[in-house]
Image (tube, rainbow, N blue to C red):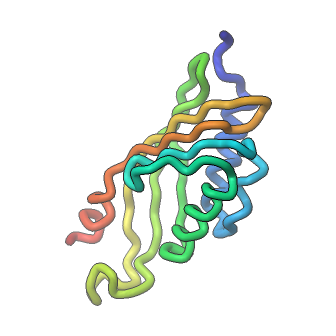
């Protein structure tokens, strides 16, 4: 197998711009119809674009200004791994009135595998406790 290509790193960049766009449909063009998303915090795998979109749309309701900014990429014959910083603003009192309007931050990593120029598997690793910790809670 060949190492992941520059084109696959570019797809990873564009996918994360789409995740950060605020539009639930934006990532679709970068994923296969039968893609699998495994978010370690959420637990179960989301299989197929409709399930992934539903999961992501729910996240946008909770965090309308969600931003995922990649900062490093690694490649292998299986695909691309990247580290990122996720931020969003607390829109309500879910963490208490003192946290409302504050921006939280959580670092994480993702593994992407590709088929026919699109992502067929995304596995996201992060620690949900980082959200509260970054708010000083």
Residue 104, percent across and down? 37, 68
Seen at 53% across and 56% down, the residue is 68
Q: Is residue 38 visible?
A: yes
40 shown above or below 113: below
Who is closer to the viewer here, 22 or 29? 29
Residue 111, percent across and down? 52, 35
Q: Is residue 107 visible?
A: no
Residue 98, percent across and down? 26, 86
Res 91 → quadrant: bottom left
- Looking at the image, residue 33 sits to the left or right of residue 42; the answer is right
Seen at 60% across and 47% down, the residue is 47
**Quadrant where the image shows the C terminus:** bottom left
Numbered disc total: 0
- Looking at the image, residue 33 sits to the left or right of residue 92; the answer is right
Res 118 → quadrant: top right
- Looking at the image, residue 83 sits to the left or right of residue 135; the answer is right
Res 117 → quadrant: top right
Residue furthest left in the image = 137
**Quadrant where the image shows the N terminus:** top right
Residue furthest top in the image = 1
Residue 67, percent across and down? 54, 62
Seen at 34% across and 87% down, the residue is 93
Who is closer to the viewer here, 48 or 15? 48
11 shown above or below 6: below
């Amino acid at each position: 197998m060949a190492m992941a290509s520059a084109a696959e790193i570019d797809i990873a960049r564009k996918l994360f711009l789409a995740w950060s766009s605020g539009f639930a449909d934006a990532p679709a063009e970068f994923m296969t119809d039968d893609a699998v998303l495994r978010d370690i915090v959420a637990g179960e795998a989301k299989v197929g674009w409709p399930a992934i979109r539903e999961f992501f749309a729910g996240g946008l309701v909770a965090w309308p200004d969600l931003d995922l900014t990649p900062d490093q990429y690694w490649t292998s014959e299986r695909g691309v791994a990247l580290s990122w910083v996720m931020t969003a603003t607390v829109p309500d009192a879910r963490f208490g009135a003192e946290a409302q309007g504050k921006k939280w931050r959580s670092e994480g990593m993702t593994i992407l595998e590709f088929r026919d120029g699109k992502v067929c598997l995304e596995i996201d690793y992060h620690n949900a406790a980082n959200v509260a910790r970054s708010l000083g809670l």
